[in-house]
Image (cartoon, grey):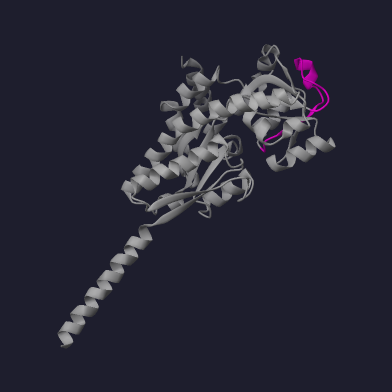
Amino acid sequence: MLRRMFLGATAALALLAAHGASAQEEMILRSADIHPDGYPTVEAVKYMGQLLEEKTNGRIKVEVFHSRQLGEEKDTIEQTRFGVIDMNRVNLAPFNNLIPQTVVPALPFVFRSIEHMHKVMDGEIGNEILAAFEAHDLVALCFYDSGARSFYTVNKPIRSFADMQGQKIRVQQSDMWLSMMQALKANPTPMSYGEVYSALQTGVIDGAENNWPSFESSKHYEVAKFYTLTQHSMSPEVLTMSKATWDKLTPEDQTAVKEAAKASVAKMRELWEAQEKKSEETVRAAGVEVITIDKQPFIDAMAPVYAEFANTEELKDLVARIQAVQ
């Protein structure tokens, strides 16, 4: 009798332990993005979550917190490094001061075209840059597009290099972007993305810079009626995971995460292309003047920026290798 009770209790404990192990394997990954719901990067991470859920039979899910719900990029990077947030979609610029390799794809005019950028970042060079994140408590999973960034202003249109002089331009919180604006003779004003609309509206800044979808989704086009096609940056964005979260995954689940992330890139680019076209149409229909300029004076002005930030043999070599990709 006692033996049967003991065996019964042992079996029950084993069943509970097995159930507990199964429950522990279930995971919801919290992912941050500053962009609104429906934005291509937000939808790409959702798509990644769907793929991951399929690959793990529903054990691992992704919940995307869009629209800066978890904070601005500078804040979410720190939270991700400490494991408070599991995943984070961020532009490369906020990483420039932390991870030197991220400076190179963010350098102005380093890419000749979007196609050139894709070829570089999808290949060996891109993988090297992704690998550099791990030393900083992050696992970089893939690159997403950020389009071509151009300047937009409220009162004074930029029709030539000379028109940059003295304009107060919002920049991302990065030393490289500050240096770039100074090289263009503008007055750089570091500011979080969420503050830009009111700053444009109240004259705290004269302008900012971003791609078509961000210019449109942020409603900045309502106050900035001049958009100048400088296309000075095609710096990609990166999807990162907390190393603390990554280390909790089995090798099989780590592979599933990487595969799902890589597969989401094609989806993101498809959505991006459609959104870019739609955003440009919306902006033009709202009466924004779109200005084409001679880019060469802008390119020529970047020599001191390259000298300052591609300032080691490793980074100079990285620039040369990017430029050599055909």
Q: Do we see residue 211 in this rendering?
A: no
On the picture, is 292 further left or further right than 168? left
Q: Going 15% across and 84% down the picture, which residue do you hit?
A: 3
Residue 309 pos. (x, y %): 61, 28
The quarter of the rendered structure image containing the N terminus is bottom left
**In the rendered image, which quarter is residue 204 located in?**
top right
Query: 219 above or below 274?
Result: below
Residue 97 pos. (x, y %): 60, 38
Q: Do we see residue 208 in this rendering?
A: yes
Query: 224 above or below 173?
Result: above
On the picture, is 59 further left or further right than 88? left
Report the front residue among 301 and 275. 275
Q: Is residue 33 magenta?
A: no
Residue 128 pos. (x, y %): 44, 32
Residue 158 pos. (x, y %): 77, 19
- The region drawn magenta spans 154-173
Number of marks present in the image shown: 0
**In the rendered image, which quarter is residue 290 located in?**
top right
Report the front residue among 310 and 285. 285
On the picture, is 159 further left or further right than 49? right
**In the rendered image, which quarter is residue 229 located in?**
top right
